[in-house]
Amino acid sequence: MYRVRKGCEIMEENKLAIQNELTIEDIKNLIYTIRDKQVMLDSDVAMLYHYPTKRINETVNRNKQRFPENFCFQLTDEENEALRSQIATLNKNIGRGKHRKYLPYVFTEQGIAMLSGLLKNDIAIQVSINIMNAFVEMRKFLMINGYLIHKYLALDFDHIF
């Protein structure tokens, strides 16, 4: 006996297969430090959750009380330009559909956790787990390297030379 599957079921299975191929390292590459906070861009979060960026931002705007500034905030023009140059995105004057009408939102780890509870698709749970693991690894990396940098700066080089 064969089970007939709808096209959307097959598409959802394909999304899950693609999602399972994403590594924590891939997700760590989507985490930036802005305002001394580790954050992810709304467009990257949308890509991971398989939602349009517009829908992610609509969810935030409809649930503003769930997203205080330490969970989610909108970038300033200066922050956006600095980030654009850092990640080498497309030239903002390239043409229709290739630039954003509004400044992007960014999500902290807590904002990602809150967002995952509001999104209704099968991928949200696994993606959220992977994102949380990536944030934890980034925190560990920063703690270890911060300690080493502090130790290095504390060395008295005058006695060496």
Image: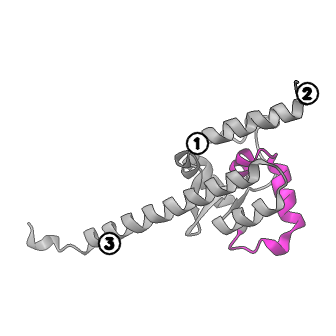
Residue 104 vs 149, above or below: the answer is: above
Whether residue 37 is visible here, answered yes or no, is yes
Q: Quadrant of residue 129?
A: bottom right
Query: Mark 3 is on which residue type?
Result: His
Colouring scheme, one of rainbow, by chain, secondary structure, one colour: one colour
Task: Locate the N terminus and report the quarter of the image it occupies.
Answer: top right
* Residue labelled with disc 3: 150
Residue 21 vs 131, above or below: the answer is: above
Disc sitting over residue 73 in the figure: none
Point 75% across, 48% down: residue: 123
Residue most extreme to the front: 1
Cα–Cα gap, marks 3 and 1: 30 Å
> Depth-wise, is mark 3 or mark 2 nearer the camera?
2
N-terminal label among 1 and 2: 2
Whether residue 74 is visible here, answered yes or no, is no
Magenta segment, principal secondary structure?
Answer: helix
* Residue labelled with disc 2: 4
Cα–Cα gap, marks 1 and 2: 45 Å
> Depth-wise, is mark 1 or mark 2 nearer the camera?
2
| Along the line of sight, the residue nearer the viewer: 40 or 140 | 140
Tell whether 122 sits left or right of 134.
right
* Residue labelled with disc 1: 88
